[in-house]
Image (spheres, grey):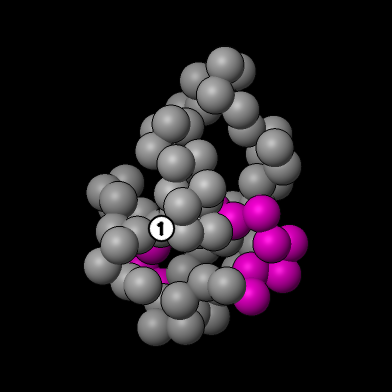
Amino acid sequence: MEIQLFRGSGRVFAATEDPAGANLPPQFGPWVPFKVLEMNRDGDPIPGINTEECLDDIERYGLHVTDAHVRITESVL
């Protein structure tokens, strides 16, 4: 699955399948495109990203958000 990574304010990062990041929470914007990754559950680990947690959130909520590498997805929805 192709995942778009965005950088928000401070140490906040988000991952989504939406290339425009239109579903990202506005309170941490402006969102800046950071990187595009191919991510899947049985792929190689990606440094700094908990792949399982990220993909779980994207499947459930459409996005995954962290602050200083700590998951905050549910608290920003």
Instruction: Tell me where residue 67 appears, x and y as whole percent.
Output: 31, 58
Residue sitting at x 47%, y 69%: 8
Tell me which corner region of the image, top left, top right, bottom left or bottom right, holds residue 25: bottom left
| Residue, disc 1 | 65
Is residue 11 or residue 57 the one in the foreground?
57
How many circles with numbers are drawn on the protein?
Answer: 1
Magenta residue span: 9-22
User: Label 1 is placed on what type of residue?
Assistant: Val
Which quadrant, please, contains the C terminus?
A: bottom left
Residue 58 inside the magenta-drawn segment = no
User: Is 11 situated left or right of 75 in this image?
Assistant: right
The secondary element bearing badge 1 is classed as strand
Q: Position of residue 1 (x, y in %)?
A: 70, 37
- Give the percent coordinates (x, y) of residue 22: 64, 75
Q: Residue furthest front?
A: 60
What residue is at 52 percent from the left and 50 percent from the top?
58
| Residue 34 visible at all | no
Q: Is residue 67 above or below residue 40?
A: below
The residue closer to the viewer here, 33 or 52, is 52
Position of 21 relative to 49 (above/below): below
